[in-house]
Image: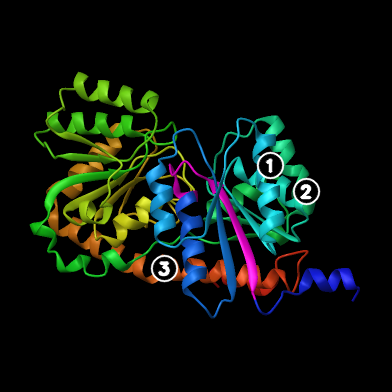
Amino acid sequence: MSDSMASINTVDPERGIRVLHFVTGGFSGGATQVAVQLVRAALEDNEVGMEPLLVLNRKRRTPPGRIEELQAQGVPLRTVQAWTHRGVIEQLVAICREFGPDVLVAHGFSEHIWGRMAAVQAGVPRIVHVEHNTRERYTPRRLAQTLALVPVTNAFVGVSQGVHDALIQMGMPADRTVAIPNGIDLTPFRRALEIPFHEREPGIVMVSRFSRQKDHDSLIRALHLLRQRGLTPTVHLAGGGGDRHRRPIERLVRKCGLQSQVIFHGVHRDVPGLLKSNRICVLSTHWEGMPLALLEGMAAGNAMVASYVPGVREVITNGVTGLLVAESDPHALADALQEVLTDVPLASQLGVNAHHQAFREHGRDRMTRRYSDLITDLFIAPSKVSRKSRARSNGR
C-alpha cells in the first residue's frame, strides 16, 4: 500500500474518526433532525470512536433560538451563511480545513451538492451523500451537478427503500447505494400505551410544515366531508413553513366554515405530548422520504392514516398498523378517518400495532448504528460500500 493510500485508510487513534455533517439550517424538515441525531449519538457512544461536527447552512428564516439551544446542549456546531452557493462552498471549505474531517456527510437537497463540492476542494478523503426525499427540485443543471459528483462520492444513502430506488433511477451506482431507514428518539413514547386509547381526545393531529410537499388541502376538504356526515373532530395542525403555503389553507378553513375545528399551532414544542393526548395521527402528503412525524405518531400509539406514497407505504401496513389512502383524494381520506373515528376498537388496535412496530424497527439507536457501520466500512473499502455494510443498512 502506498503512503498516500495508507493516509486515506487510517485515522489518528488519539482522536478517532472525524465526521462532519452538513445540512440545511432551516429546521423545516427531517434532514436537519436526522443530522442532529447522528451528531448526538456519536457524542454519547464512546465505543464508536467518532468526533462529530454539525455544520448548518443558515437560512434567512433560521430561528436563532434553535441554534442557541443546540449549542447549550453541547452539540458541536458551526454555521455557514452566504447569498450565493459559491459563498457557502468557500465557507465550508474553510471549516473543513480547520476541522480536518475524515468523512463529510452531506444531507439533503441542495446541500448535498454544495457540501460535496466543498469536500472535494478541501481534500476530504471520504464523502457520503444522504438523500431525504423521493422527489426533489432537480432542474437539469442540478441533476447534472449531482451526477458529476458521483465519481468522488463513496456512498449514497436513501432514508427509505423508496428513496434508495429513486437514487438508482437518477443514476447513482447500485454498488455504492444503501437504504438506511430513519429512526426517532423513542424515549418520550415508552409509556404511551399506558394512556388508555378511549381516554384520549378523539382528535386528529398532523405534524407537518406547510409546503408544496404536504397535502393539508386534502385534509381540510376531508374534514368538511366529515362534517356533512355529522362528525366534527378537532384537527391540530403543528408545523412551521412559509406563509404562501399556510395562508391558502387558512382561507380554505374559513371557506368551509371549519374555524372552530382546526387549530394552527405553528411550531409545537411538545409534539409527543400532543400526539399522546389524541387518538389519530394523519400524514396527508404528496411525496416523502421516511417522515419522522409518521414514526412519532406510530410510537405514540395513534391510529395512523396516511397517503399511499413511497416512504410511507414501506412503513405502514394497511389495516394492520394504519390505514393508507390514495394521494390527493379527500373522499378516500374522509372514509378512512370516519372508520377510525367511529370504530374505536379498530383504531385502538391499529395504534397498539403501530407502537410496537415503531419500537421494534424505527428507533434512533438502530439508525445511528447503521450509519456508524457504513462510515466504519468506508475505511475498509473507501471506493465502495462493502457487502457487510449493505446488509446491515438494508436490515438483513
Q: CA distance from mark 2 to mark 3?
A: 38 Å
Q: Amino acid at mark 2?
A: Gln
Image quarter in which the N terminus is found: bottom right
> Relative to the observer, which residue lies in front, 375 or 87?
87
| Residue 38 visible here | yes
The quadrant in which residue 126 appears is bottom right
- Residue found 14% across the figure and 52% down from its top: 343
Q: Amino acid at mark 3?
A: Glu
- Residue found 21% across the figure and 65% down from its top: 192
Sooner in the amino-acid sequence: mark 2 or mark 3: 2
Q: CA distance from mark 3 to mark 1?
A: 36 Å
For label 3, the residue is 361
| Residue 320 visible here | no
Q: Helix or strand or loop: what does disc 1 sit on?
A: helix
When the figure is inspected, residue 175 is found, relative to residue 64, above or below; the finding is below
User: Residue 143 at what x, y percent from top left?
Assistant: 69, 37
Q: Is residue 155 magenta?
A: no
> Relative to the observer, which residue lies in front, 173 or 96?
96
For label 2, the residue is 121
Q: Is residue 28 magenta?
A: yes
Sooner in the amino-acid sequence: mark 2 or mark 1: 1
User: Residue 315 at what x, y percent from top left?
Assistant: 41, 57
For label 1, the residue is 89
Question: Callout 2 environment at 10 Å: few (<14), some (14 to 19), or many (20+)?
Answer: some
User: Residue 197 at what x, y percent from top left?
Assistant: 14, 60
Contact between labelled residues 1 and 2, with CB atoms less than 8 Å apart: yes
Magenta region? 15-31
When the figure is inspected, residue 353 is found, relative to residue 87, above or below; the finding is below
